[in-house]
């Protein structure tokens, strides 16, 4: 069950539409309405809310890029089938 779910997610991340959707979400995340929502004089754990928003968004985008790279790397089984 878990392997099938993992394979489904990895296949979905290989599609061009997924790349475009995550790119557009990143652009939207950096535009006025969202930046205005988090630009408040409020601190969370002593950090300004805007700083946390940008830092967490940056870390999530790195995680998404890592998942894309995992989905697009050649499998180890493919490497074993090469003829020397």
Image (cartoon, rainbow, N blue to C red):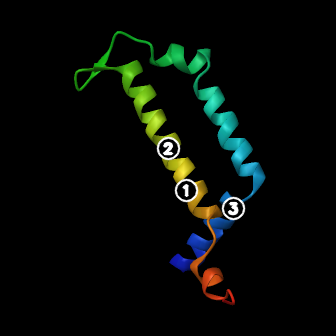
> Which residue is nearer to you in this view: 18 or 72?
72
Q: What residue is rendered at 77% in x and 52% in y? A: 16
Q: Is residue 5 above or below residue 69?
A: below
Q: How far is disc 3 from disc 1 in space, using C-alphas? A: 11 Å
Residue 46 in picture, x, y percent from top left: 22, 21
Q: Is residue 6 above or below residue 44?
A: below
Residue 7 in picture, x, y percent from top left: 61, 73
Give the labeled residue for mark 3.
12
Give the labeled residue for mark 1.
67
Residue ranking furthest to the top = 41
Residue 64 in picture, x, y percent from top left: 55, 48
Circle number at residue 62: 2
Mark 1 or mark 3, which is nearer the start of the sequence? 3
Residue 62 in picture, x, y percent from top left: 49, 44
Q: Which quadrant of the rendered structure holds the N terminus?
A: bottom right
Q: Are marks 2 and 3 in contact (CB under 8 Å)?
A: no
Q: How far is disc 2 from disc 3 in space, using C-alphas? A: 18 Å
Kindly state the secondary structure of the residue where label 1 is placed: helix
Kindly state the secondary structure of the residue where label 3 is placed: helix
Q: Is residue 45 above or below residue 7?
A: above
Kindly state the secondary structure of the residue where label 2 is placed: helix
Mark 3 or mark 2, which is nearer the start of the sequence? 3
Q: Are marks 1 and 2 in contact (CB under 8 Å)?
A: no
Crowding at mark 3 (Cα within 10 Å: few <14, some 14-19, many 20+): some
Q: What residue is rendered at 56% in x and 62% in y? A: 70
């Amino acid at each position: 069950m878990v392997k099938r779910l993992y394979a489904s997610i990895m296949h979905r991340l290989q599609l061009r539409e997924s790349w475009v959707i995550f790119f557009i979400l990143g652009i939207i995340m950096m535009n006025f309405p969202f930046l205005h929502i988090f630009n408040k004089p409020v601190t969370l754990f002593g950090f300004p809310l805007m700083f946390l928003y940008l830092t967490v968004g940056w870390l999530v985008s790195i995680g998404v890029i890592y998942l894309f790279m995992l989905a697009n790397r050649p499998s180890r089984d493919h490497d074993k089938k090469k003829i020397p």
